[in-house]
């Protein structure tokens, strides 16, 4: 009975350690996305403060720069994850072959792009009466890019 109790205690300690390590990893990944967002948003604010930024179109161009930077980072991270996925498929281990991982990642990225387009096009369409509709749609794309950065972190 004592050995069973010890085994349960050891298992509980191991599980707690793994859970704590995972929380630390998650916090680190969240912080990396927050730092990226802070950087591009600071650049966006600087652009808005520029004396030549006077019109809605000018401010949309500032926002577009932020959206482009975030989408470029999503694409970079996606490519990094794809390299890992292809490596996994080419070097299976004793547990799995991982042959579907690259195609699933590719599908995930394509479906994410479709979702963002539909969601942000909807926001653009519902804002038809205002002059800030492009800004709303661009900011929608930016927010989705930040979410995608974090979602891509879940892939190995």
Image: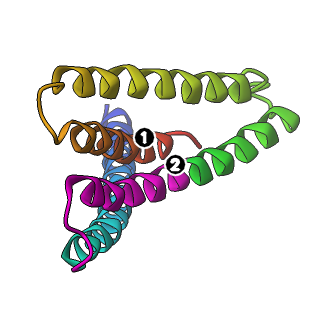
Q: Which residue is pictured at 59% across the width and 48% down the height?
A: 75
Magenta stretch mostly in which secondary structure? helix
Q: Residue 121: image x %, image y %?
A: 33, 24
Does the magenta portion include 94?
no
- Give left or right: position of 145 versus 5: right
Q: Is residue 85 left or right of residue 151?
A: right
- Spatial CA span between label 1 and label 2: 7 Å
Mark identifier at residue 133: none
User: Is 31 placed above or below 156 here?
Assistant: below
Counting from the top left corner in percent of width and height, residue 124 is at: 26, 28
* Residue 74: mark in rendering: 2
Residue sitting at 69 percent across and 27 percent down? 101
Task: Determine crowd level at label 2: few under 14, some 14-19, many 20+ residues with C-alpha closer than 10 A.
Answer: many
| Whether residue 30 can be seen here | no
Quadrant (top left, top right, bottom left, bottom right) of the N terminus: top left
Question: Where is the C terminus found, in terms of image quarters?
Answer: top right
**Residue 59 is inside the magenta segment:** yes
Identify the secondary structure beneath mark 1: helix
SS assignment at label 2: helix
**Label 1–label 2 contact, CB within 8 A:** yes
Q: Is residue 35 left or right of residue 156?
A: left
Judge by depth and name the residue closer to the eye, 94 or 27: 27
> Total label count?
2
Say which residue appears at 40% left-offset and 28% top-offset: 116
In the image shown, does 52 or 2 lie closer to the viewer? 52
x, y (%) of residue 9? Answer: 30, 43
Snapshot quadrant of residue 85: top right
Extreme residue in the right direction? 90
* Relative to 102, 117 lies left or right: left
The residue sitting at the left extreme is 129
In the image, residue 149 lies at what x, y percent? Answer: 44, 47
Marking on residue 148: 1
């Amino acid at each position: 009975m004592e050995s069973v109790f010890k085994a349960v205690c050891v298992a509980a300690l191991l599980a707690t350690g793994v859970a704590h390590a995972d929380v630390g990893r998650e916090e680190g990944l969240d912080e990396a996305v927050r730092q990226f967002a802070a950087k591009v948003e600071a650049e966006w604010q600087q652009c808005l403060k520029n004396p030549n930024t006077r019109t809605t179109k000018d401010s949309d161009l500032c926002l577009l720069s932020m959206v482009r930077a975030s989408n470029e980072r999503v694409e970079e991270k996606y490519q990094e994850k794809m390299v890992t996925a292809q490596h996994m498929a080419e070097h299976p281990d004793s547990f799995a072959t991982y042959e579907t991982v690259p195609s699933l990642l590719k599908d995930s990225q394509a479906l994410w792009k479709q979702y963002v387009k539909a969601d942000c096009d909807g926001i653009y369409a519902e804002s038809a009466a205002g002059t800030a509709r492009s800004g709303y749609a661009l900011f929608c794309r930016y927010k989705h890019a930040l979410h995608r950065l974090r979602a891509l972190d879940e892939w190995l």
